[in-house]
Image (cartoon, coloured by chain):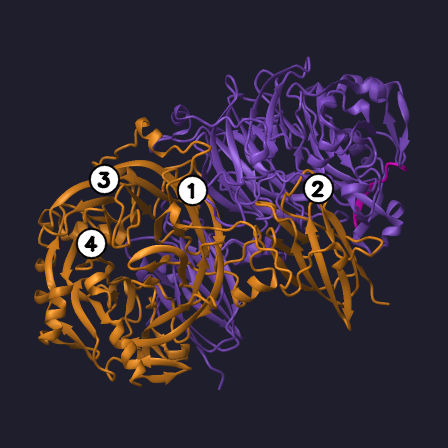
Chain colours: A purple, B orange
Amino acid sequence: MKKWFPVVSGITAGFLAATVFFADFNVGSKTVAVDPAKKSNAEKVYVPFGEKDEYYLFASGGHSGQMFIYGVPSMRHIRTVPVFSQDSATGYGWDEHTKELMGGYTWGDLHHPAFSETNGDYDGKWMFATDVGNSRAAVMGLDSFTVRDIISVPNTSGPHCAAFVTENTEYIFLPTRFAVPLGSEYASLDEYSEKYRGVMSAVSFDETTEKLGVAWQVALPPWSYDLSDAGKGMSKDWAVLTTYNTEEATTNLEINASQADRDYIVLFNWKELEKMVADGQFDEVNGQKIIFPEKHKGSIYLIPVAKSPHGVDVTPDGKRFIASGKLAPAMTVFSFEKAFAAIGNKDFSGERNGIPVLNYESVMEREVNPENALGPLHTQFDDKGMAYTTMFISSEVVKWDPNTGETLDRVAVQYSPGHSVAAEGDTMSPDGKYLVALNKIAKDSYLSVGPSHPESMQLIDISGKMEVIQSAPVNPEPHYAQMIKADKIKTFTVYPKDENRPNSVWKQEDTRIERIGDEVHVYGIAMRSKFIFDAKSQRPDVIEVNEGDNVVLHLTNIDLDQDITHGFAINMHDINIEVQPGQTNTLKFKADKAGTYPLYCTNFCSALHQEMTGYLLVKPKQ
Amino acid sequence: MKKWFPVVSGITAGFLAATVFFADFNVGSKTVAVDPAKKSNAEKVYVPFGEKDEYYLFASGGHSGQMFIYGVPSMRHIRTVPVFSQDSATGYGWDEHTKELMGGYTWGDLHHPAFSETNGDYDGKWMFATDVGNSRAAVMGLDSFTVRDIISVPNTSGPHCAAFVTENTEYIFLPTRFAVPLGSEYASLDEYSEKYRGVMSAVSFDETTEKLGVAWQVALPPWSYDLSDAGKGMSKDWAVLTTYNTEEATTNLEINASQADRDYIVLFNWKELEKMVADGQFDEVNGQKIIFPEKHKGSIYLIPVAKSPHGVDVTPDGKRFIASGKLAPAMTVFSFEKAFAAIGNKDFSGERNGIPVLNYESVMEREVNPENALGPLHTQFDDKGMAYTTMFISSEVVKWDPNTGETLDRVAVQYSPGHSVAAEGDTMSPDGKYLVALNKIAKDSYLSVGPSHPESMQLIDISGKMEVIQSAPVNPEPHYAQMIKADKIKTFTVYPKDENRPNSVWKQEDTRIERIGDEVHVYGIAMRSKFIFDAKSQRPDVIEVNEGDNVVLHLTNIDLDQDITHGFAINMHDINIEVQPGQTNTLKFKADKAGTYPLYCTNFCSALHQEMTGYLLVKPKQ
């Protein structure tokens, strides 16, 4: 025990245990003084109309299933972009295209977002994210802030330890938080160690087809994989993951997964694994190429680390990785160079589950224990290579020097930060300047909205002495975020007028309603300020069908002006889709209720928006 | 024509038409100078940590189906509260209680929010709202910011012209935007004038049972009803609605509903209507008591008004009402006193659809036409009784004196404001100080998020010369908002420990899993940092069932600490519920997939949140 807690002597073990296990986050009893942001900070965060924020912040929306876009430094919530959950505000999940993307699910648990990278720098093209709830991965195109693909990841359960992206977006790695039998087959928990696995998937992304795919998988031991990072520069072919529950407990993990003094960092060389797969060193299970480390040896190593680490973060220069032991008050700095040497020298202390364990002493550079700092979770970096670690239990961010371990600065945050994100923080050249603490507990920070609280994001000026300069409430629940220079993202705002697009209609005279058996195909137009489903009809904005018909509506927004969105809803039909300027969307529904139902544009589009209506008439069966 | 456009002489009719019908909101061509908010405004909107906003802003979320809560003056988005649409962030729509509230719908189009009132003042107890998409009404309790009841409103379609609340919340009136045959029966649009109706519902709310109910309805003519307001003080028994499409057009409303120079204000006395119902002067249709004005005479009157008015707003003193003719550049000030006299004198110019039309000249006080101000939509008031009207087409807010018609001030907003909301603006005693313009078009106001833009809310300091001091992006799409003094709302944050609550479990030893046939009832506990479904089991955090079983999980969060929420998700089951501190929720699902599925807490709850997991094991059928 002592080894891992060298500076906790002033704190009784009882207090530590109580804090960790039973912490009630009681604000009143905090001893760390709150440093209130001062009025003088107002100008630092104020972005007047006519100017724009300097950075985009992409915060994962957790069990909201969405991505939250904020501007920095204003910390204004610009937009919620739907990814894994339905979003009637944008019709996401109602039109046929997005319904298909969602694959039958209505929500997701969006965890760690990751920008695509070129040469270890965010390139502003794509954003990846995972769904811990329903084991999926998604990619969003940053030209339109829309999801392009979502895949289910077979053999896995809860890709929490993701997404992390390699230096040139060769792979997005998806290790999992939960172990399951391959294919989620039924197997008793008595057979946990034999039959369960924590599978890591190497997902690739094809920029041309805009499709994600599982390239290969690794059947890691039945442990929980928490967070991860890809190497950079000298370590670019490598990646690191944290583990917990290496005890392989099957119940009451609160106690049983916190028994061993040490868990492991998994260190692997993905280039070599890729080669192993090319050489046929894998088994095929449920259609996937899976490497079993105990059988297909090499390229994967374990490094002991302070118990139940949360984050592991590679320094911008790619030379070190820092693990934060959430149940130990210690950050541990490891050296890639030392690790490579240990691997070369087979400097192993043994093996676990068929994987060699590197000698801790041979790989570790230093243990860092800022005084009274408790619950280190995740580390970010500034432009000088200095480290910023969130302390969940002592509710603060600690700045320290990875070269010396020296504590340089600390600032209280309110309360219990999980992750933090620095400007361009996961690149090879962080910007410094700003850090945002993603706090798990808001308590009474904002006007109360009852029992279900907002989370809290706090903007910290890190250009000098750290100071919290803005506190922003946020919907549940950001688990991580990335911050990118605004000028790296190039969007379009109007879809091109593509007359060859299937089912699109651009001229009023081409609108039509066609019947094929009991299918009614509507080729319609939305424009300021009317719907035209059949220009030749007495009432061009009316769709009349028979009870029981299947209706397929193709709707094109022919207003090619920025910000002129049209919606389409049918009263009492639980339907709302949207068409952005120049976009065509398809809606299918069964007209199973005879009656008269107004239809209307749901997105305010012009002074005559209220007049943009029509009717769905469903003739009763005779 | 001349009569309605007295000051538009400088604007050609062609320009006006072009602006109204084909406006492309092209920013570049705007002649109104943008007055950029200045750095000096930063301090006016900055609320440092440790302080709180002065007002809550409740903005309707439109087709998002939700309510957005902002703080003023910071304009920070504090929380999205689910009302009509599913929200996995809070489990809304997944647990049995909220699923039942949603009544089989997954989304709604949340329009005009309205606080409950006592003596014409917001009392901070309840918030009402309507669903234009699926014809419903909802009430939210402001002690917890949770929905307490949602009702479907029979015989109606799209309660857009709502909700407005009488002086002591006797009724919430729900007139509709769309006309349909009663009961949404099928009827040809050729029979529109005979068979269609625009029904207004008088909805009452029982504070004790927390239930909404339709007290009675009025079968108004088949027109569109747009906005409304209840009287105050001397006019407290009365209410006013705007109408459009009094032409009774059945197609292409953009043109056909804009033919007549005049539409109407509907003025009615709800106390008298209530008495008529008590006296049996109604017909019963589809289980509702409906007054047909052409048959059950009295208490309802029409007043001609400039064509296609949007808003109608009662002045804080209750003496006047102001209608904004969206297709005429005029606000018209009417006098309740004059209207009452005209009614007393039967000073009618005729009748429409069996309803007497009051003489315009007898009721109108003045027409107000600020120079070049186009597209007046909605009026709010300050503490001195001055009026603030949003101008959709000329993108500005105009301050003017209802007593004289004099223009006092104007400020450009970006762009195309629909509604605006003043601090305590719909009460008998507005606060002045702040006005928020709810702008329909953001264009390039914020960092681009692609084709689908945020809307924009701009905070205007109205304490002196009007000045835009903050611009806040907002998710689609606020249609109206109300702003209440923060200290009027008293929330609780922890549900009381009620040991008699059905299905709740508070002690570990009371947890249990009971089988009744193929139903498995789980009485479980969520607590930091574990689930306990059956404390006596070898693995208390595991639920094992047979394929095909119906599982009923009752989960109680026994952590009675503020902001300690637990979630509950099952991997690959599209399920997420939440339990707030002290709350019990019930989840039902069919275990129809044999296999091994991790379950876990989705809401970060403690340092050992990651360990708060278990398994659902579904044994395959033999």
Q: Amino acid at mark 4?
A: Ala
Task: Please say if the residues under marks 1 and 3 sit with CB atoms less than 8 Å apart.
Answer: no
Q: Which mark is residue B17?
A: 4
Task: Please say if the residues under marks 3 and 4 sit with CB atoms less than 8 Å apart.
Answer: no
Q: CA distance from mark 2 to mark 3?
A: 52 Å
Name the front one of labels 2 and 3. 2
Q: Which residues are the magenta region?
A: A287-295
Residue B222 visible (yes or no):
yes
Q: CA distance from mark 1 to mark 4?
A: 27 Å
Residue A529 visible (yes or no):
no
At x 52% / y 17%, what residue is drawn? Answer: A465
Q: Where, quadrant-wise, is the N terminus of chain A in this rendering?
A: top right
Q: Secondary structure at mark 3?
A: strand
Residue ID for mark 1: A493
Q: Residue furthest top?
A: A404
Chain holding disc 2: B
